[in-house]
Each structure stands twice: as C-alpha cells, then as structure tokens.
C-alpha cells in the first residue's frame, strides 16, 4: 500500500490515499495543498469517512473550495481548489 | 440504481445486527432476570457506538487534528460533551444516584496520558474511537484493539518486565499490605499495592474547603461541575478560538461586512461559528454527554433494584463463582468505560493458551476474569462495535479494510502504547479523562494534558514521516 500524489496536468493533481486511516488522509491533504499554487485543483480519493469531516472544515477555515464531493463503492472523491 | 441497492443492503444488515442483539438480550433475560444488568450495558454500548460513528467522535482526533490540520472540530465536540455530562453528573451526585468514584492522584496520571496520547495518534483512534472504527470494518483499528488493548494490556499487568522501574519503597509498602503472596507476582502488582493505593484521591465537592463553603447539593454543581469541568472547558474553547479560528473568521467577516470587525459581537459570532462548524460532531457531543449521564442513572438503579454494588455479587448468586475475584467482584464501572474489559478478554484468551492470569492483583483481587459472555463491561464494548456497525451500514460507510504495509506497524505499536498507557492511570481517554473531569476529579485534567502532549509528539512524528513520502512522490514532477 502506498499513497499517490501525481501531477495530472497544468495546475491539476491527484492524491490517492485509499487504505489509509486517520490521521494520514488529512495530513497528506494538507501537505499536498501546501505544495500547490493558488487556483490549482487536486482530486482526492480516500476511503476513511472520519477524515472527510476534518478535511471539509480545514478547507473552510483556510479558504480552499471543495468543488465536488461524491461517494462511490465505499470510496470518497473530493475535488479541492486551493484558495 | 446501484446506490439504491447498496442502501437496501445496508438497511438489511443494520436491522439484522439489531435483531440479533435484541434476541441475545431476550435470551439473557430468559436465563435470569439478573442479566438485566448486563443487558443495560449492551444497549448503552450500542447507543455510544451509533453516536460515536455518526459524530466521527474520536478523542484522538481532538488534539491530533488541531495540531495536524488546525481543525478544532473534535476538541469542540468533546468539550461540549464534557459540559453536558458534568451537569448531569452533578445532578446524579446531588440525588445520591451516582456511581462515580475519583482515582488516586499523582504524576503517574500525566505520564500514562502521554504514553496513551502517542499511541492513539499512531493507531489512528483512541480507545473508544478504535472500537467504533472496528464497527466500520477498519482492520488497523482491530489490530490496535485486539493486540494492544486486549492482549498487550493483559500481558502488561502480569509480567515482571518492569521491575527495574520499581523503587524499593514501593516494594516495602506493597509487602506491608499483607496481601496473599500468590497474587503479588508482577511489576504492576507492586505498582498498585506499593504506590497507587498510597496516593490520595481528590474530588472537589468532597474537599473540606468546598464542603464547608457549599453545604448541601450546591457543592456538586459548583465544585464538581462548574469549577472542575464547565469553566476549564469554556476557557479551553476560548483559547482554541483565539489560536486557531479567530484570525481567519474575522478576516472573512470583515470581507463580508465590507469593514473592520472589532466588536464583542463579532467575537461571539466567531465562537458560535466554531462550535457549530461541524453540526454532527457538536450535536453528538450534546447527546453523548446526556446519554453518559443517563447510563450512570440506570446502572445505579440496577444496583438498587438488585441490592448490590457490583455485578460480581449477582454472578455469585447465579453460581458463577469462578468468574469473580477473591473479593467477589468483577470489573463493573457503572458508567462508560473502555480498556479494563478488553484486558479481561485478552487475559481470558491467554489463559486458553496456558497462561495463568489469576495470579495478580488486577484480575485476581480487583476485577475477576468472567467468561466473556458474562462480562458486563465487555458487552458494552461489543455494543459499541455493533452500534457503530449499524450506523455505518445505514450510511453506506461500512467497508472491510485489511491493514496493509506501514499501517500494520502503526496499529500494533499504537495499540500497545494505548494499552500500556491506560493501565498505570487506571483508565483511558474515557475512564481517566472524560468521566473523571466531569465527576469533579482534577486528575482527569492531568491525564488529558498528558494525552495532548503525547498527541503532539505523535503528530510531529507523522508530519516528518509524511513529508518524506511526499518528497519522494514529488521527485517525478
């Protein structure tokens, strides 16, 4: 099992932390956003429901925007724009 | 379509689990009316599990998410729960319906809290958090709960490995107690008899100062609830607001208002915004506080109804004398509690492999070793797992996740540290922190401070670890 943080295009990233439990998804999400530029978008995939609540509040506090959020087959997909 | 099918499957699972538990409860009741006591534990555990899962309520994330992500969601939820629980605790104490008892006060509480704090960050959940996550299908939490809280804890109380840490005066003090030699075999035995039992207990309402100043029931509300729980919790909420929320909130508010924000009203709005930022967590905080109080009320009622002060007396009446300790007791906290019962399960399993677990104070004299199906507090833990499973199934959040790679190591190490950090303080995040603080015992705050220090160290380690992994991933950019 390994986390994936990939650049998928100009200003676009993928962060896959499936299999990870707290606190790893929120830590990797925070660190990914720190490494991106304002306006960049990261698509995050995780399967740990507890982390989503924390990530949502973190984005709200810091000013990042969650553009899309969906759950499919036990996986949660978040699209976050760095603010 | 697929979503609808999953919803239906989830509902079938939820009803089936609940149905089985109802059936189990009826079977116990049919076997003997005394098992009503145990049934109460099952269903309070079930309620805790549902609320913990719905509110993502985990004490580990309170300090961890604050340090790791700057998010106070869980810290706020716990402090809200604490305030409500302490008020109900005070009401119960005032009406002589409380089962609460303070713990020996000393520096050991702080040290144990630190060990526990590191453990809960590594394993990804506190003691109650790990149980509810087992109910979500989380394998890492299962490793932490089974190998750390169950097996690790049982081994901890029965080995001599820590004798090098025991000063001679503890040995002398333990020997002076004149306990049967066959129960004084481990390092933990000497620690309990030679150190812990010599420490004073402190409950604010029972101090001379408070008893004299506040006659009658007022001492429970003012000393135990207001001074020990509500005011410190409110102060911590303000500190969290000032350090983590205030700047960002006022900036956003100024932007929205089109001007400066300097009024007290703005600060109050910021506090309220912080408290309601995660409605499900805060709502569950309120509910958990109320249910935890109700739990104490019901268990006290059971004790009055059956004329006992411990479930061990009922087990003895039913003829299960091998379940109880030499004092005729089993572990029966009378309120929400995790860890000791997991230790009992671990000891029960180890005895099946030939390990004698009755030859120590913890099981032999204090808590007994009942068969798991007659262990009331263990049923509370099972109730938490099943309650969380039902809630997760209803929300399509249940997923079997086998622990892989590094998570196996974190689960095992974290679980062991939680098990070993809960024993010296005679409790975990629930028994040593939540219950004690709400009950007017300041040692709860000492344990809480330890947990925060430990969590800070754990987060520092994970920050370093994840930074290395991120750097590796970014080499390809």
Image: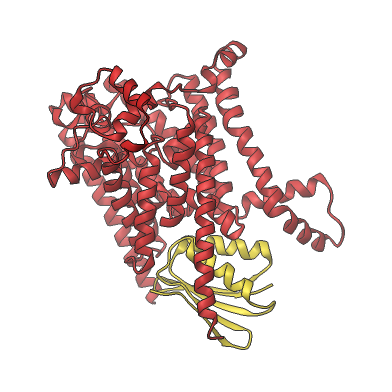
| Residue positioned 48% across, 44% down in the render | B114
Residue B462 x %, y %: 50, 61
Residue B278 visible in the snapshot: no
Q: As drawn, is A80 to the left or to the right of B350?
A: right
Q: Which chain is yellow?
A: A
Color encoding of the figure: by chain
Image quarter hosting the N terminus of chain B = bottom left
The relative height of residue B228 versus residue B216 in the rendered view (above or below) is: below
Q: In the figure, residue B425 lies in which quadrant?
A: top left
- Chain given the colour red: B
Q: Residue at horizontal 39%, vertical 27%?
A: B196
Quarter of the rendering containing residue B326: top left
> Which residue reaches farthest bottom?
A9
Vertical arrangement, residue B343 with respect to residue B175, above or below: below
Q: Nearer the viewer, residue A48 or B433?
A: B433
Number of marks present in the image shown? 0
Q: Where is residue B263 drawn, in percent x and y?
A: 83, 47
Answer whether residue B32 is visible to the viewer in this image. yes
x and y, in percent, of residue B473 in the image? 51, 79
In the image, taking residue B256 as reference, residue B462 lies left or right, namely: left
Residue at screen point 58% across, 64% down: A56
Give B473 or A14, whichever is nearer the viewer: B473
Placement of A42 over or under B409, stated as above or below? below
- Specify whether A9 is left or right of A83: left
Quadrant, the C terminus of chain B: bottom right
Using the image, determine if residue B267 lies above or below residue B108: below
Depth check, front residue: B426 or B203: B426
Residue A76: x and y in percent read 47, 71
């Amino acid at each position: 099992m390994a986390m994936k943080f990939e650049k998928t295009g100009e200003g676009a990233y993928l962060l896959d932390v499936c299999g990870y439990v707290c606190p790893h998804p929120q830590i990797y999400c925070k660190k990914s956003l720190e490494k991106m530029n304002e306006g960049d978008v990261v698509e995050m995939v995780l399967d740990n429901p507890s982390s989503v609540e924390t990530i949502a509040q973190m984005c709200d506090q810091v000013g990042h925007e969650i553009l899309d959020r969906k759950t499919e087959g036990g996986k949660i997909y978040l699209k976050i724009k760095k603010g | 379509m697929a979503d609808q099918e999953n919803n239906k499957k989830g509902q079938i699972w939820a009803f089936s689990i609940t149905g089985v538990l109802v059936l189990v409860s009826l079977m116990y009741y049919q076997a003997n009316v005394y098992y009503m006591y145990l049934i109460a534990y099952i269903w309070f555990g079930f309620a805790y599990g549902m609320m913990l899962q719905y509110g993502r309520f985990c004490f580990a994330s309170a300090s961890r998410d604050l340090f790791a992500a700057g998010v106070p969601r869980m810290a706020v939820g716990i402090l809200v729960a604490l305030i409500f629980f302490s008020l109900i605790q005070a009401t119960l104490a005032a009406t002589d319906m409380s089962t609460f008892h303070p713990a020996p006060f000393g520096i050991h509480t702080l040290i144990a809290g630190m060990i526990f704090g590191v453990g809960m960050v590594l394993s990804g959940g506190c003691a109650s958090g790990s149980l509810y996550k087992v109910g979500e299908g989380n394998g890492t939490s299962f490793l932490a709960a089974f190998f750390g809280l169950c097996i690790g804890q049982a081994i901890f109380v029965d080995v001599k490995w820590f004798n090098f840490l025991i000063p001679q005066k503890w040995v002398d003090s333990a020997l002076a107690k004149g306990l049967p030699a066959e129960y004084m075999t481990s390092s933990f035995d000497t620690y309990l008899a030679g150190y812990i039992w010599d420490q004073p207990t402190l409950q604010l309402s029972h101090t001379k100062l408070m008893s004299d100043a506040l006659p009658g029931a007022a001492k429970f509300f003012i000393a135990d609830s207001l001074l020990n729980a509500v005011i410190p919790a409110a102060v911590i909420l303000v500190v969290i607001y000032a350090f983590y929320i205030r700047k960002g909130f006022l900036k956003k508010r100024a932007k929205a208002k089109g001007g400066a924000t300097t009024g007290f009203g703005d600060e109050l709005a910021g506090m309220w915004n912080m408290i309601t930022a995660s409605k499900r967590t805060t709502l569950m905080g309120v509910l958990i506080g109320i249910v935890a109080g109700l739990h104490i009320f019901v268990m006290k009622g059971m004790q009055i109804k059956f004329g006992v002060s411990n479930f061990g007396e009922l087990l003895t009446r039913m003829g299960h004398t091998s379940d109880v300790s030499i004092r005729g007791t089993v572990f029966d906290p009378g309120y929400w509690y995790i860890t000791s019962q997991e230790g009992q399960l671990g000891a029960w399993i180890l005895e099946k492999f030939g390990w004698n677990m009755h030859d120590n104070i913890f099981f032999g004299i204090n808590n007994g070793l009942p068969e798991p199906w007659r262990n009331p507090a263990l049923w509370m833990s099972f109730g938490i797992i099943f309650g969380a499973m039902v809630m997760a199934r209803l929300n399509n959040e249940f997923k079997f996740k086998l622990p892989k790679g590094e998570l196996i190591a974190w689960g095992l190490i974290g679980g062991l540290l939680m098990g070993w950090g809960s024993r010296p303080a005679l409790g975990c995040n629930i028994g040593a922190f939540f219950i004690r603080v709400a009950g007017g015992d300041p040692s709860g705050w000492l344990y809480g401070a330890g947990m925060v220090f430990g969590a800070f160290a754990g987060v520092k380690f994970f920050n370093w670890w994840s930074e290395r992994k991120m750097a590796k991933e970014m080499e390809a950019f």
